[in-house]
Image (spheres, grey):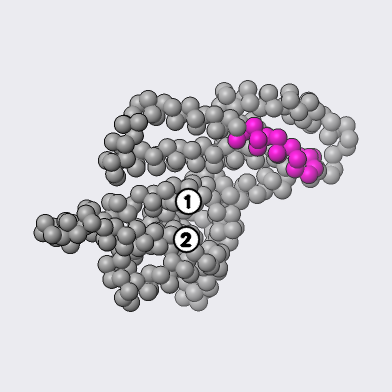
């Protein structure tokens, strides 16, 4: 296991290096320069700023300097936000996005698994059809549509919750509900499909013949096997939710990382664009590693097969 983790870490570092390199050069193809929004600057002032940030250097020199700083943990400083270190900006912004993402993922996944279980147990029943309908709607309708409906009903008409803003727990309720619809639908669909397949397997028939009660069959044997493909889907979705969903953050006035990223693209703030991209990449590769390790925990047969190789 130690050797496996070490190899995966090496692959992760190589992957991050490739992502950083590709992102750096693609970013240079963005139209304009960071000074396009500074129309009041004279050509001499613009030249001084370009020189200060090393933007006058040849592209290979800029690339080498950025990668050298990256190795030392330096993401650079923002061009447009008072020369603030990029790491400080990301740390200040990722909190709200991570909170909303974690809440929506946890609530949506748990409810989706329960809904999928009920649907599988009551196959071709009313709960099965209801679960299928919820899954289709959740996968088909964009989250910002749910967000608008939630604001209209619970904030404007009923007045139970604030329309937007950020600062208290009540401000997280509506955006969390809007974001959790997609993971709920995904978890319900995968759980139902996998549970129906597992419950029809020979080993489940054998377990019933041995007198195992229905609770043990569903949760100990069925759900454990059904969770494996679900984890594969939830991993990348977790990264997406926890690093910010731009439209939802804009609708509810959440000062998250998604809103910051789009603003940075608009003003061509290279360091923040790169820093946000790398943050997403790091979270993604770490989640993939965690998923691989969870496979072995949930299903020992996977761990055994890996050891035989």
Q: Which SS class for mark 1?
A: helix
Horizontal side of 288 relative to 302 (left or right) equals right
Q: Are marks 2 and 1 in contact (CB under 8 Å)?
A: yes
Circle 2 residue: 182
Give the image location of residue 122, x and y in percent. Answer: 28, 71
**Which badge, 2 or 1, comes first in the chain's sequence?**
2
Q: Quadrant of the N terminus?
A: top left
Camera-side residue of 243 and 138:
138
The reply to whether the magenta stretch includes residue 24 is yes
One can see residue 122 in this view = yes
Q: Quadrant for residue 57, please give it.
A: top right
Say if 177 sits above or below 239 in the image: below
Camera-side residue of 93 and 69:
69
The 10 Å Cα crowd at callout 1, few under 14, some 14 to 19, many 20 or more, is: some
- Total count of labels: 2
| Tag of residue 199 | none
The reply to whether the magenta stretch includes residue 163 is no
């Amino acid at each position: 296991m130690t050797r496996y983790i070490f190899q995966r870490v090496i692959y992760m570092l190589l992957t991050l290096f490739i992502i950083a390199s590709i992102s750096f050069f693609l970013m240079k193809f963005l139209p304009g320069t960071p000074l396009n929004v500074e129309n009041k600057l004279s050509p001499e002032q613009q030249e001084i700023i370009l020189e200060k940030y090393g933007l006058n250097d040849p592209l290979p020199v800029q690339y080498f300097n950025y990668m050298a700083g990256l190795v030392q943990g330096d993401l650079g400083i923002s061009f447009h936000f008072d020369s603030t270190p990029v790491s400080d900006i990301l740390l200040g912004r990722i909190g709200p996005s991570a909170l909303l993402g974690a809440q929506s993922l946890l609530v949506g996944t748990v409810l989706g698994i329960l809904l999928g279980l009920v649907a599988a147990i009551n196959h071709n029943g009313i709960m099965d059809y209801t679960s299928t309908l919820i899954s289709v709607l959740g996968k088909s309708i964009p989250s910002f549509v749910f967000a608008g409906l939630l604001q209209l009903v619970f904030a404007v008409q009923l007045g139970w919750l604030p329309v937007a803003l950020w600062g208290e727990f009540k401000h997280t309720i509506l955006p969390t509900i809007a974001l959790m619809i997609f993971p709920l639908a995904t978890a319900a669909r995968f759980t139902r499909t996998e549970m129906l397949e597992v419950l029809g397997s020979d080993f489940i028939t054998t377990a019933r013949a041995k007198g195992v009660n229905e609770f043990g069959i569903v949760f100990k044997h069925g759900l454990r096997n059904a969770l494996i493909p679900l984890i594969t889907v939830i991993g990348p979705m977790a990264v997406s939710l926890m690093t910010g969903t731009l439209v939802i953050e804009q609708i509810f006035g959440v000062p998250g990382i998604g809103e910051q990223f789009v603003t940075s693209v608009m003003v061509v703030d290279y360091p923040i664009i790169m820093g946000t991209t790398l943050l997403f990449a790091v979270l993604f590769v770490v989640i993939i590693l965690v998923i691989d390790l969870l496979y072995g925990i949930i299903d020992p047969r996977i761990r055994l097969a890996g050891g035989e190789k």
